[in-house]
Amino acid sequence: MLLAAVVLIVIVALVFDFINGFHDAANSIATVVSTRVLSPNLAVAWAAFFNFVAAFAGGVHVANTMGKGIINFEMLRAAGPTAVLMVIFSALMGAITWNLLTWWWGLPSSSSHALAGGMIGATLPVLGFQGLVGSGIARIAAFIVLSPLIGMFLGITMMVISTWTVHKQTPLRVDTWFRRLQLVSSAIFSFSHGTNDAQKVMGIIAVVLFGTIWRDRPFHIDWWMIISCHAAIAMGTFFGGWRIIRTMGHSLTKLAPIGGFSAETGGGVTIIALAELGIPVSTTHTITGAIVGVGSTRGWRAVKWGTAGRIIWAWVFTIPAAALVSVLVYGITLAVVRLVG
């Protein structure tokens, strides 16, 4: 029975990873589609390929943070296998529910923060506040603000450098060059998306396994977790969340290929650097900041601040909303468990 429950939770975790890729496909391809460098179908295939390739080059720092840096893993493991399974199941369902709602509304919210909120909410009924790792949560909360600002700064910097480099060239030549370069920048961002986001679910799967059937083993990330999580997120990206792609690619600002290149490169570099530090940042927040930064170089009115405001509200509510849903799921799950004994 325990093994069957573990397998079920691992499958649910991979489903979340798939939905994460589906939900965040816009982050990787919105600019390359809006500038018409690639067709939508080619763009998602391109992004999915580099999501998966990241499995062979990325580290596992973010996975360790998600597994041991938000909730007190040793305390949760001591609470027993049932507690581990119920907490992780409730956290995943809270994050999945919020992701699907924001996809339906066309809002590019953060899958990373939805999962973090789900873990926080599901842990509280079992372990209370002492079961949370305050320093890890504080870092994640800080980068809700910092990651889009860093993305914005690097997006502006890349745009200024790129514009200065080609200012003597004809618009046609500039457009031709950056259409080709945008393939590279899109690959960089898709790689960074895989590096950061796939690792979150590796950490969750490790918590399930080393908190239940492998309780006598030290916490670590196995190779098969890396491959399966990258495969799941790549598959989700391939199917794409088109509602959010329209918001990211057209509703925030209008981008030319030079702008798309600058936004993707600035956002991708930010995410790769922070992933090496083990900080599970939001790829959504980062690329949104980079796109807004690039758009603002053409003037304040080039950015549609009403759309940006809707996105920011989605950011603000993600962690508490996912936490609330996970608490409700935990209560329902507990009632079902008690009913069936």
Image (cartoon, rainbow, N blue to C red):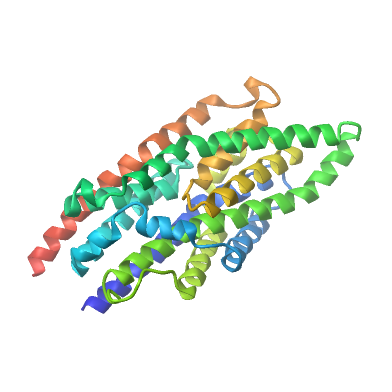
Q: Dividing the image into 4 quarters, which one contains the C terminus?
A: bottom left
- Residue at the spot x=35%, y=69% of the render? 10
Q: Residue at x 57, y 60 (%)?
A: 238
Q: Which residue is found at the position 22% from the left and 76% from the top?
A: 2
Using the image, determine if residue 231 lies above or below residue 270.
below
Of residues 338 and 148, the one nearer the viewer is: 148
As displayed, is residue 118 above or below residue 173?
below
- On screen, 138 above or below 185? above
Tell me the quarter of the picture where residue 339 sits: bottom left
User: Is 25 on the left-hand or right-hand side of 154?
Assistant: left
Q: Quadrant of residue 67?
A: bottom left
Viewer-side residue, 125 vs 18: 125
Q: Quadrant of the N terminus?
A: bottom left
Residue 98 seen in the figure: no
Residue 96 location (% of width, % of height):
36, 54
239 or 53: which is nearer to us? 53
Number of marks in the rendered image: 0
Please determine whether, in this image, residue 173 is positioned above or below residue 229: above
- The percent position of residue 120, horizontal first and vertical second, equals 29, 48
Q: How far across and down, in percent of the image, does residue 196 sit?
A: 52, 55
Q: Is residue 22 left or right of residue 33?
A: left
Asked if residue 175 lies left or right of residue 18, the reply is right
Q: Give the farthest residue toward the top.
A: 300
On screen, residue 140 versus residue 331, left or right, reads right
Q: Residue at x 84, y 36 (%)?
A: 165
Q: Quadrant of residue 17?
A: bottom left
Regarding residue 30, the answer to whether it shows in the image is yes
Residue 172 lies, in percent from the top left, at 88, 38
